[in-house]
Image (spheres, grey):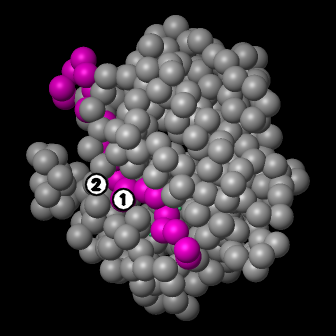
């Protein structure tokens, strides 16, 4: 199986390296843009993420098998025979659609060539996400156009469109990382409270975002091992932002959207015969736009999630200018890695 853990970025570098597949450093605000590197041989994506933090935290993905890694300056990857971690960066540019499409297609070629056809989770980071590109199109909408073209070109090779997050980062440019598997079965889940993002009307951009509201991963070896990945979820009902200027209202709708998404009623519509509650969520990331809202957001999250859940609050921009908060999480069936 595959395990997630959050550790403080200044963690002991001698931490056990066995089974380390990849790591993502949700760093402070200092850097100019995303950095892709191998740290002690491990593919590592360093993101300038958080206006409020100096250090940030590191998200680590561990697997059971022996890890092999490879790649180049744009795309790094590691795999163990069942799981693949792949991270890519797009340098600052006047516009992003073409570079996004090409790098996504390189990642799709990689998962096909190495034999990990089921991508089950993607995270995307866009510098200046709400700012305009050189043509006056918002950078997020520009990114979505390139990504949609890649999914359109690659859909015959992919096992569906997975759960994702698309969020702002400091600096310029863009970055993504993804998880894929060889033999596990993924189900990509929509939320009856929301229009599927890939069906959003063109008022949100020339091409819609390419992601599902959640993905479940059924381990091939152990039928009981089912993980559930919740996409970044915000105060959107149907396709519209609700409570545009009300942080408490936005927290309530985002959390209620997740509660419904993982409910037995909603999962059953996708052939997934399980049910989950908010108290089962772990490895929660809460993205918020304004520091002044953090106390309200913490109160809502402390009420909704279990007290020992791993949770990180990240001050950054969000994909729509009227969104104030967004939450992602996962239901890990594998025991939490220490
Ligand atoms: C919040 C939403 O979208 C955000 C953007 C995503 C993307 O573009 O990949 C995925 C989930 C969220 O981070 C939404 O449309 O509901």
User: Is residue 234 within the magenta segment?
Assistant: no
Q: Report the quarter where the N terminus lies.
A: top left
Bin the neighbour count of mark 2 within 10 Å (Cα to Cα): few under 14, some 14-19, many 20 and up: many
Residue annotated with mark 2: 189
Give SS at disc 1: loop
User: Is residue 212 within the magenta segment?
Assistant: yes
What residue lies at 58% left-to-right and 63% top-to-bottom? 145
Residue annotated with mark 1: 213
| Residue 73 in the figure: left or right of residue 107 | right
Q: Position of residue 330 (x, y in %)?
A: 39, 47
How many marks the image carries: the answer is 2
| Residue 113 in the figure: left or right of residue 335 | right
For residue 206, above or below residue 36:
below
Report whether residue 186 is seen: yes
What residue lies at 83% left-to-right and 64% top-to-bottom? 94
What residue lies at 64% left-to-right and 32% top-to-bottom? 23
Quick check: is the Cβ at mark 1 less than 8 Å away from ligand 1?
yes
The residue closer to the viewer here, 88 or 147, is 147
Q: Are marks 1 and 2 in contact (CB under 8 Å)?
A: yes
Give the magenta-colored segment's residue range.
Answer: 205-224
Q: Position of residue 45 (x, y in %)?
A: 71, 38
Give SS at disc 2: strand
What residue lies at 37% left-to-right and 56% top-to-bottom? 212
The residue closer to the viewer here, 292 or 216, is 216
Q: Main secondary structure of the magenta part?
A: loop
């Amino acid at each position: 199986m595959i395990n997630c853990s959050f550790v403080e970025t200044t963690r002991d570098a001698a931490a056990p390296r066995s089974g380390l597949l990849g790591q993502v450093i949700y760093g402070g605000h200092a850097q100019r843009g995303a950095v892709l590197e191998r740290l002690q041989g491990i593919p590592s994506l360093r993101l300038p993420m958080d206006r409020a933090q100096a250090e940030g935290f590191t998200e680590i993905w561990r697997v059971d098998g022996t890890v092999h890694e490879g790649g180049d300056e744009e795309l790094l990857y590691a795999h163990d025979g069942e799981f693949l971690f792949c991270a890519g960066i797009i340098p600052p540019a006047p516009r992003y659609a073409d570079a996004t499409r090409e790098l996504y297609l390189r990642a799709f070629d990689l998962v096909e060539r190495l034999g990990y056809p089921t991508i089950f989770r993607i995270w995307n980071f866009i510098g200046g996400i709400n700012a305009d590109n050189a043509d006056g199109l918002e950078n997020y909408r520009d990114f979505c156009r390139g990504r949609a073209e890649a999914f359109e070109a690659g859909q015959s090779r992919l096992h569906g469109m997975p759960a994702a997050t698309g969020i702002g980062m400091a600096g310029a440019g863009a970055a993504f990382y993804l998880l894929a598997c060889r033999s596990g079965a993924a189900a990509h889940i929509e939320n009856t409270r929301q229009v599927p993002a890939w069906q959003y009307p063109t008022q949100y951009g020339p091409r819609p975002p390419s992601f599902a509201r959640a993905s479940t991963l059924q381990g091939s070896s152990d039928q009981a091992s089912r993980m559930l990945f919740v996409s970044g979820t915000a105060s959107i009902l149907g396709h519209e932002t609700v409570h545009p200027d009300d942080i408490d209202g936005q927290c309530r709708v985002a959390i209620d959207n997740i509660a419904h998404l993982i409910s037995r009623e909603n999962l059953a519509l996708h052939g997934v015969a399980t049910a989950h509650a908010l108290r089962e969520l772990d490895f929660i990331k809460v993205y918020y736009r304004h520091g002044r809202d953090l106390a309200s957001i913490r109160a809502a999250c402390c009420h909704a999630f279990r007290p020992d859940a791993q949770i990180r609050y990240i001050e950054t921009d969000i994909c729509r200018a009227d969104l104030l908060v967004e939450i992602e999480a996962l239901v890990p069936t594998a025991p939490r890695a220490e």
